[in-house]
Amino acid sequence: MSFVPSSPVDDQTLLAIPGVSQIERKERYVTVTGAGDLAASLIEALGRIGVRLSDIEARRGSLDDAFVKLTRGDAADRAEADQLR
């Protein structure tokens, strides 16, 4: 999820939010990745300290992420099947 905070937010504050595992910054944009409902967690946690989010863009994952997940699962399934033979 990418967003522009209304005021600066340090990495420690962001990493303390449940689900946030990685932070990237580019110009005024902050991009966080992780698990769970990041949008709701970020809006709630940052709202409590007076930080508002704008230019919010949420993504579920890329095609590359989907490919890796699908092919990794297939390879593991084939290896397990081969061991059972």
Image (spheres, helix red, strand yellow):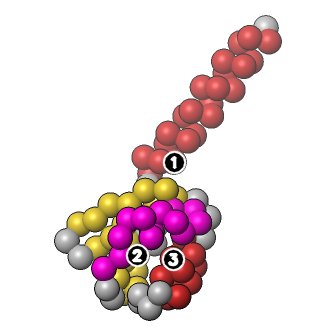
Quarter location, residue 54: bottom left
Residue at the spot 54% in from the left edge and 80% down from the top edge: 45
Q: Are marks 3 and 1 in contact (CB under 8 Å)?
A: no
Q: Which residue was labeled with disc 2?
A: 57
Quarter location, residue 7: bottom left
Q: Which residues are magenta?
A: 8-20
> Which of 53 and 47 lies nearest the eye of the viewer?
47
Camera-side mark, 3 or 2: 3
Residue at the spot 57% in from the left edge and 40% down from the top edge: 70
> Which of 37 and 83 lies nearest the eye of the viewer?
37
Question: How much space separates mark 2 and mark 1, taking CA atoms?
Answer: 19 Å
The percent position of residue 16, horizontal first and vertical second, equals 52, 66
Say what secondary structure mark 2 lies in. strand
Say what secondary structure mark 1 lies in. helix
Indicate the amino acid at tag 3: Leu
Residue at the spot 55% in from the left edge and 41% down from the top edge: 69
Q: Earlier in the sequence, mark 2 or mark 1?
A: 2
Quarter location, residue 57: bottom left
Q: Which residue was labeled with disc 1?
A: 66
Q: Quadrant of the N terminus?
A: bottom left
Question: How much space separates mark 3 and mark 1, taking CA atoms?
Answer: 24 Å
Q: Which residue was labeled with disc 3?
A: 42
